[in-house]
Amino acid sequence: MIEHPRGLLLFDFDGTVYRGDAPFRAYASHIAEALREPDRQTYLGRAARQLAGVREVEAGDYWQAMARLAKPYHLDRATLQEAFMKTRAYMMTDACRLEVPGALPSFLARARPRVIVALASNSPEETCLPLLQKLGLHDAFHVVRPGAGKPEGLLPLIAELEEQFQIPPGQVMSVGDHYGNDIAPARSAGYRTAYITPGDYFPGPVDLAGRRLEDVLPGVEEWVEGLWP
């Protein structure tokens, strides 16, 4: 652990430190299991168009988009949660192909001696930690916090880590692909932000932005280096 960290770099998990459409297609497929024809095909068609870049609904990320596309069919929360947990189980199989951005592991290795590098996920521990292991990222972060309860839980988590690691006031950057969860709360507190938005969805201001993690990493690294004289 760093003796005197100069800052806190907080990463989102899904859609940020790994990517791939397979989980969203599986999620849509499991949601569709609860629908009858012709609603099932209508829903799946809209889901496919959303993933292809056609904005069928406004959403913070593709998980939210798949759920919002089902809104006209009045599915209950339990049905959506069941579809999500089935998807998480599928993600642990070899059939689900996920990609860790090639530049990320080396970046994290350079950043860890300088700042506290943390990961915050809304996913429960039983799905988050095994997936990190599968991706080879289980040792890449100083802190991993499943069940983070973002957006409401983001600022309390930052405050907790600032106190725990004695982070200088305000030296925080939040990196994520969900504007409402990862970007808006951090900006409201005056922290720096890096936003990944494959669909160019900008509901508000951001410090750094790009369609892929690789687009923002140079700016994130510049911020890390700037904390040191």
Image (cartoon, grey):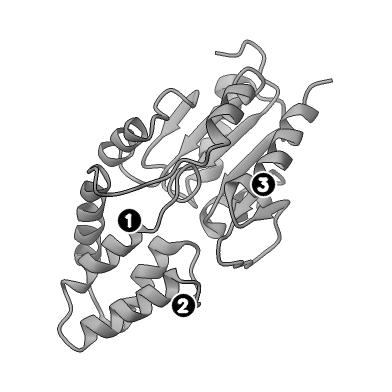
Q: Amino acid at mark 2?
A: Val
Provide residue 133's location: percent of width, then percent of height: 33, 30
Observer-nearest residue: 160 or 178? Answer: 178
Identify the image quadrant of the N terminus.
top right
Mark 2 element type? loop
Q: Choose top left, top right, bottom left or bottom right for residue 83.
A: bottom left
Distance of label 3 from label 1 (alpha carbons): 23 Å
Q: Choose top left, top right, bottom left or bottom right for residue 205.
A: bottom right
Kindly identify which numbered label has been placed on residue 216: 3
Distance of label 1 from label 2 (alpha carbons): 18 Å
Pointer 3: residues within 10 angstroms few (<14), some, or many (20+)? Answer: some
Q: Amino acid at mark 1?
A: Pro
Q: Residue drawn at (66%, 41%), measured in percent from left and top?
A: 217
Closer to us: mark 1 or mark 2?
Answer: 1
Provide residue 11's location: percent of width, then percent of height: 53, 40
Kindly identify which numbered label has been placed on residue 57: 2
Kindly identify which numbered label has been placed on residue 102: none
Q: Residue drawn at (28%, 34%), measured in percent from left and top?
A: 130
Provide residue 225's location: percent of width, then percent of height: 76, 27
Identify the image quadrant of the C terminus.
top right
Residue position marked by numbered label 1 in the rendering: 23
Pointer 1: residues within 10 angstroms few (<14), some, or many (20+)? Answer: many
Outermost residue, top side: 3
